[in-house]
Image (cartoon, rainbow, N blue to C red):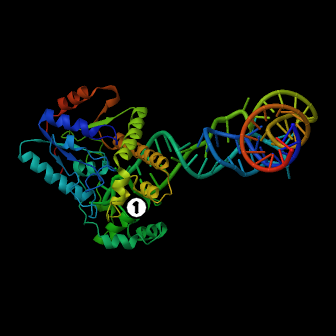
Amino acid sequence: MVGPTATGKSALAVDVALATGGEIVSADAFQIYQGLDLLTAKPEAHLTEQVPHHLLGTTSAREEMNAAIFRGQAKEAIAVIQKRKKRALLVGGSGLYIKALTHGLSVLPPVDVELRRQLNELSTEELGTRLAELDAVTADNIDLKNRRRVARALEICLQTGRPAAPQRKTWPGQSDGEADSSLKGVFVFRDKDDLYERINQRVERMFAEGVVEEVRNLGEISLRAGKALGLTQIRLHLEGRLTRAECVAALQQSTRRYAKRQLTWFRHQTNFEPLNLSLLSHVEAVAWIAGRITLPVSVKE
RNA sequence: GGCUGGGUAGCUCAGUUGGUAGAGCAGAGGACUGAAAAUCCUCGUGUCGCCGGUUCGAUUCCGGCCCCAGCCA
């Protein structure tokens, strides 16, 4: 089950899991970290108590996390669930993580943190020039202004000693336009006004419940976990450079933008069945989804 | 009441020596193979405050009026 933030996936997933004998595997790049429970809007205890949840708060916020590591952990979790003769219900909003699991990733060496650090010191232009020397094909096709992608391609070239292009295969089922029929997926969403209203309210609730305190008491965290939405704004608020109201508004805005990006991804990168939750009651939505679950999620090797 | 600035895109403002105008932000759409809550790309017609005058032509010049801010009474 995929869908943008604040659509209502967590509550829905629990009842679908109960109805179908399933356990939930979270596919969320930030809820996987320990701490930041309020800021990342982790499912609350009254939900997680009802059904086992996997990969929720299981990684230290100081540790390395990425799509490949997630894929490995999620495969393990799914294997455990299937051994218990239960269904694994993958639920989340991190599109790349989900696609890494359902479509696989090219076989590449793990990220070299030291190499990445060195590349981060170069300008985007320099990265592009070096990539063109090592891998003209990728350099011609990539968006050379997108430094993350240029740096990543360069990393692959440097780590493997070969151009990245032939090593990164296209997603199965995408190059030929074929859908992967072994997967049952639902893409839940809401009407824009409905979703934005829910986002705005959720941010208000976060503050009422004490996100500011949560961030104040936060210890050391990795640069990566530090990218969680709202962290920067709440820190500015703690420094007195942003009023509480400005901080709330800023977080609501960045969350709305995030939801928009998620919608674009899910619309174009998945072929899951869309389900507009604005048009259904909770009970109807649970029944609709449960009725379509007949096979456990299978994972591409 | 007088003086001085202003009134141009949803917001903040630029600009047009007279030929109907453009930035930032907001917003919308899109891309996406180990940082993904990341990173990146594309998209700007609006009675240029209102009414009149001059002019082939006024958002631009002139007059009057309205509104906002500041100063003076």
Identity of the residue drawn at 46% across and 58% down: A236
The spot of residue A147 in percent (x, y) is 43, 62
Q: Is residue A85 visible?
A: yes
Subunit that carries the residue with mark 1:
A
Q: Is residue A301 visible?
A: no
Q: Quadrant of residue A256?
A: top left
Residue A60 on image: x %, y %: 24, 61
Image quarter where the N terminus of chain A lies is: top left
Tell me how many marks there are. 1
Residue at point 37%, 44% (across, down): A208
Whether A225 is drawn above or below A84: the answer is: below
Residue drawn at (22%, 32%), measured in percent from left and top? A289
Front-most of residues A281 and A189? A281
Residue B13, given in percent of the width and then of the height, sits at 69, 49
Check disc 1 and report its element: helix, strand or loop: helix
Q: Residue A184, located in which quarter of the rendered image?
A: top left
Q: Which residue is mark 1?
A: A148
Type of amino acid at the residue the image marks with label 1: Arg
Badge 1 crowding class, 10 Å Cα cut-off, few under 14, some 14 to 19, many 20 or more, is some
Residue at 24 percent across and 49 percent down: it is: A103
